[in-house]
Amino acid sequence: MSEAGRSVLAAREVVKKFSGPDGSVIEVLNGANLSVSQGESLSIRGESGSGKSTFLNVISWLDQPDGGSVVWDGTEVPRISSREIARRRSEVLGFVFQSYCLMPELDVLENVLMAARVLGRIGRPEKERAENLLCQVGLQDRLKQLPGKLSGGERQRVAIARALINRPSVLLADEPTGNLDEKTADTVMELLLHLCRDETAALVLVTHNPLFAKRADRQVTLSGGRFNDQ
Amino acid sequence: MPWSLYLALKQLFPTGRIFSFYSGISIVGVMLGVMVLLIVQTVMNGFGDKIRENIVARDADIRIVSNNILYDWKDLLIELEARDSVLAATPYAEGVVMMKNGQVPFMPFIRGIHLDREAKVFPVEGFLSNVPLSELRCTLDDLDDEKIILGVDLAASLQASAGSVLEIFTPLMLEKAKQDEVLLPRELELAGVFQSGWYEVDSNTAIVTLRVMQELYGLGRGIHGIALKLKDGVDAELESRVLQEHFDEKGVPVRALSWLKKNESFLFFLNMEKWVMFFIMIFIVLVASFSITVTLSVSVLRKTREIGLLAALGARSGQVAMTFCMQSISIGVIGVGLGIGGALLALHYRNAVIQALLGLFNAQDSFYQLYGFEGIPVAYSIRDFVLVSVFTLLLTTLAGLLPAIRAARLKPAEALRSE
């Protein structure tokens, strides 16, 4: 398999069930299969409640599946210890959330560096990379600003820089433009795709917006707990 | 620096601000608790030391006493004085008498002293020179078998002045009265007064010569005991035990009592009082620790999504818990540091503060009469400082455990979904 075609993230027959308020079992994911290659961008669409965010939580092992397995960059996740899962997660995956999830006590640069700190990598190279990423997202003049002073688009750009600081193989973006106006959303989406290409990171994008979904190399729809290729 | 400590410090001291409001409240709570504990302990130590100093100053290091009258005391006195540890020794006799000046009666404690030896063991000359210059100021040379010296407050109670003739009635006279003998009091002229600075002593003690006391109590040539002054550096308690063993071996029916043993109950209660105060004051630190628990619990609630984010960034649940533990430890360390600083500052300016407070209530004289001290005494004890610091740090660390466990138990996916 060529480097570009190497699978960096795979879900095999993933099952996830929840208990309903009346005690009934709701099967959100029902044998979902998906594989993402290095540098590939993939969009996931689906109706509200179809399990898109749940799928992202399950493949990132933030929520454990009730069945099936998840593979990160060749490592089958259930076979490694929880300590190793945490370390591999920070190495392999980057996250961008709809609500930005920035730490209000930290300035822009500190927020980006926090992801490197958790991985135990904090030094001059990481600081230079963080500054470089923030420069690429156009925030080179806002390094010492607190998140509270930034606009929604700027916050999401900080979150993108944070997601890429550890050079992840895959970036998981859950409705990254959901809180932004049309124009800002378009800019952020373009930035996200561009940076992922530059970093040769795969992108798994959950979005409701069909135009943004079409910009990805591949589009899938989640329906009835399974993926349908489009 | 571990990232959990980094994040804890950032949450306490966010970028762009000196400290967060809630953290500040918690730190001030711990600081006040530590301050109060240290101030109370240090002042109690000071009072204790001052009271011990006064006991040592007005009492002998060791008293040799017997249940019976000591008749063959001269050999014993020579033997005791010959010991390497003993600086001086003096015989004494003491008891209670009834005293009258005109129609004013009193029942004071009276002490018969050996004029040549007393000053070597007791600071009696200092007590006499404490008296302001007046006709009632005297020296030991003014005391003879026809005279008496009274405590300054006792003289005032008896309305006695220089030259007043006091009538003394003793238990021995009561015995004679039972046998229908004529009851004639012993008359003694007031030579002067002394002032020890202790109201209980100054209001209730009279001094006469040993011969007068032997006559009043019908002791013949006997005495009630021998008081010893030890050389500097000799442990009174240890020496009293050595002496007791020596007397027991020789079969001498006397007891050697150190000043510590003699005042054992009083000193025990003094020490108990300090620890009871410590126990009461602990509740301030407990309340402060509880406020840390509340603050951090609210913080866990407010930062639920950030806790989920930390998991997404690769943090383990133990590391998330450590972030909150580090916050409580940091609050504890900073609170203890500020508390120690505040306590030292308050103790340094204690007299200025107490003067200002007493001035407000016009109560300076009452304070000095009550305590007999020039100011509030303090004695710094490293042991107390370490104890208070360690205890507070332990409590504040425990205070962070509950919110830390709550944070660690949050499910990352649910935490990220929280509003």
Image: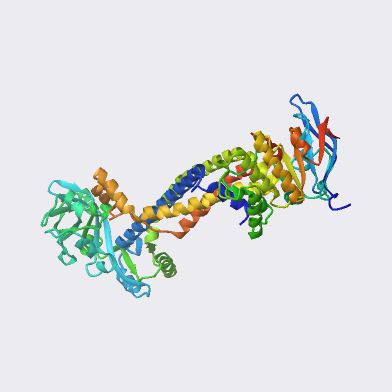
- Left or right of residue A11, residue B132 in this image: left
Q: Name the image quarter holding the C terminus of chain B.
A: top right
Q: Residue at x 58, y 40 (%)?
A: B299
Residue placed furthest toward the right: A1
| Residue B378 drawn above or below residue A78 | below
Give coordinates of residue B409: x percent, y percent: 68, 41
Q: Nearer the viewer, residue B61 or A222?
A: A222
Q: Nearer the viewer, residue B320 or B55?
A: B320
| Residue B360 drawn above or below residue B222 | above
Camera sees residue A50? yes
**Way the structure is coloured:** rainbow
Give coordinates of residue B51: x percent, y percent: 34, 56
Give coordinates of residue A212: x percent, y percent: 74, 36
Q: Residue at x 16, y 59 (%)?
A: B132
> Image quarter for residue B229?
bottom left
- Left or right of residue B339, residue B98 in this image: left
Q: Nearer the viewer, residue A180 or B140?
A: A180
Camera sees residue B181? no
Residue placed furthest toward the top: A22
